[in-house]
Amino acid sequence: MARKLALTRLELKHQREALARYSRFLPSLQRRQQQLQIEVQRTSSQLHQQKRELESLRAHFARYSSVLGDIAGLNVRATAEPIRVRTATINVVGVRVPEFVDVEFADPEYSLFATAPWVDSVLASLREQSRRTAHLAVLEERRAVLRHELARVIQRVNLFEKVKIPEAQTAIHKIRVHLGDEMAAAVGLAKMAKGRSVELS
């Protein structure tokens, strides 16, 4: 429940201070909003680029899918899966977000003599697909973190722009009108009292 506005000089002072504070903070919040929007857009562009490159790789190797089972005891697809995704945490416009570093794979154990010569190249390509898939996942996580922070900042900008600043402006106007009316009434009473004192003397 909102507290009742006190139509006093002290409240006028409080409301002016609040308006000055909101007006001072708003531009920095708006700048932060713009910076976050740019970073979300940049991350989205990187995501789309990675997706296009991954789709191109997958399309190129789709023809080999029928022969990518066990080759001389080697499960090529399983060997192409990373055992660890390495990431770092970086600061982007004041937000801690993940940064893709690389992926680690287990050393494949297969005979160079018993395995077809093209297996190395197919394995390298499948591992590149795994690397890009991991990179995509990290970029998606980064974008989610940035979007969450952007939503929070937009909420604060809207609170200041549409609620706090208009409320303070309205309160200041009401108090000024009330104090002006009080002053006018006091002047009127003073004139009446002076008139009566003249009549009585």
Image (cartoon, rainbow, N blue to C red):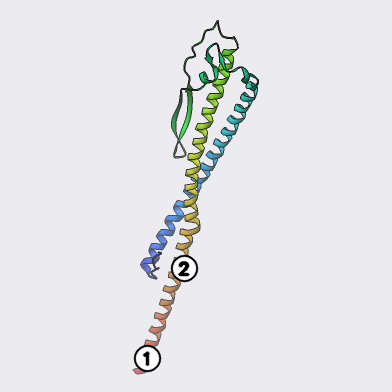
Q: Residue at left 42%, top 55%?
A: 21
Report the residue that reaches farthest toward the bottom: 200
Query: In front here: 117 or 162?
Result: 117
Q: Are marks 2 and 1 in contact (CB under 8 Å)?
A: no
Badge 2 amino acid? His
Q: Quadrant of residue 114?
A: top right
Where is residue 44? Give x, y as percent. 56, 37
Tag of residue 182: none
- Looking at the image, residue 148 sits to the left or right of residue 60; the answer is left
Where is residue 162? Give x, y as percent. 50, 58
Badge 1 amino acid? Arg
Give the secondary structure at mark 2: helix
Classify 29 as above or below 74: below
Residue under circle 1?
196
Quarter of the picture containing the N terminus is bottom left
Give the secondary structure at mark 1: helix
Where is residue 29? Give x, y as percent. 47, 48
Classify 36 as above or below 9: above
* For discs 2 and 1, the disc positioned in front in the rendered view: 2
Q: Residue at left 47%, top 66%?
A: 170
Residue under circle 2?
173
Quarter of the picture containing the C terminus is bottom left
Q: Earlier in the sequence, mark 2 or mark 1?
A: 2
